[in-house]
Image (spheres, helix red, strand yellow):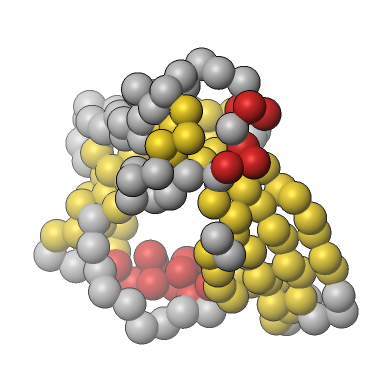
Amino acid sequence: MITSAEICSKEGNIKIPKEDIETMIYNQYLKDNFEHQDFIYTHYIDYEFSTYIRFVYSDNYYVLFCDVEPQNKYESVAKSVIKEKDYIKIKAKAYFQTEESIYSDYGLTNKISDNPSEDMLNYISDASEYEYIYILDNNNYKLEKIIRIN
């Protein structure tokens, strides 16, 4: 496990060839045709938050920067899990949080609370519901799709 201090060392930027990212995405999601773009990754060590990492795509590499603090926080609560022989379906309620408010949607258009410190049990029933579908492939479950239910 690499700590945030090791990842965010000032000795130089970490560069990852695009082929390595393509391989990771294919192995995890079985997707092999996608557009390369910048993204933010949340790094955890032993299931505990470590740091946010910004990856910038440039000259066929992803260059790592630790200069970002996303303003929005995304949380979810599982409602049900169905496991069959070849797939797993997880239904979850998800909310999206800014510094000032809680929203039911990713676009931050439907406010469900004005108090980010409020207990989520007070507003989670108003949050959007999603279904995550994982398909069995080579003895591993791979994320197939995410469907917004409401």
In which quarter of the view is residue 140 placed? Answer: bottom right
Quarter of the image with the N terminus is: top right
Q: Is residue 53 left or right of residue 13?
A: right
Q: Is residue 103 left or right of residue 92?
A: left
Instruction: Please report the residue visible at 60 percent of the width from the left and 55 percent of the height from the top.
Output: 129
In which quarter of the view is residue 14 placed? Answer: top left
Q: Name the foreground residue: 12 vs 139.
A: 139
Q: Name the foreground residue: 24 vs 78.
A: 78
Q: Name the foreground residue: 149 vs 6.
A: 149
Q: Is residue 130 visible?
A: yes
Query: Residue 3 in the image: x percent, y percent?
Result: 47, 29
Instruction: Please report the residue visible at 82 percent of the width from the left and 65 percent of the height from the top.
Output: 82
Quarter of the image with the C terminus is: bottom right
Q: Is residue 119 left or right of residue 6?
A: right
Q: Is residue 147 above or below residue 126?
A: below
Q: How many marks?
A: 0
Q: Is residue 28 visible?
A: no
Query: Residue 12 in the image: x percent, y percent?
Result: 20, 36
Query: Residue 75 in the image: x percent, y percent?
Result: 54, 39
Q: Name the foreground residue: 29 vs 105.
A: 105
Name the outermost residue toward the top. 117
Instruction: Please report the residue visible at 80 percent of the width from the left and 81 percent of the height from the top.
Output: 86
Instruction: Please report the residue visible at 36 percent of the width from the left and 35 percent of the height from the top.
Output: 72
Q: Is residue 68 left or right of residue 6?
A: left
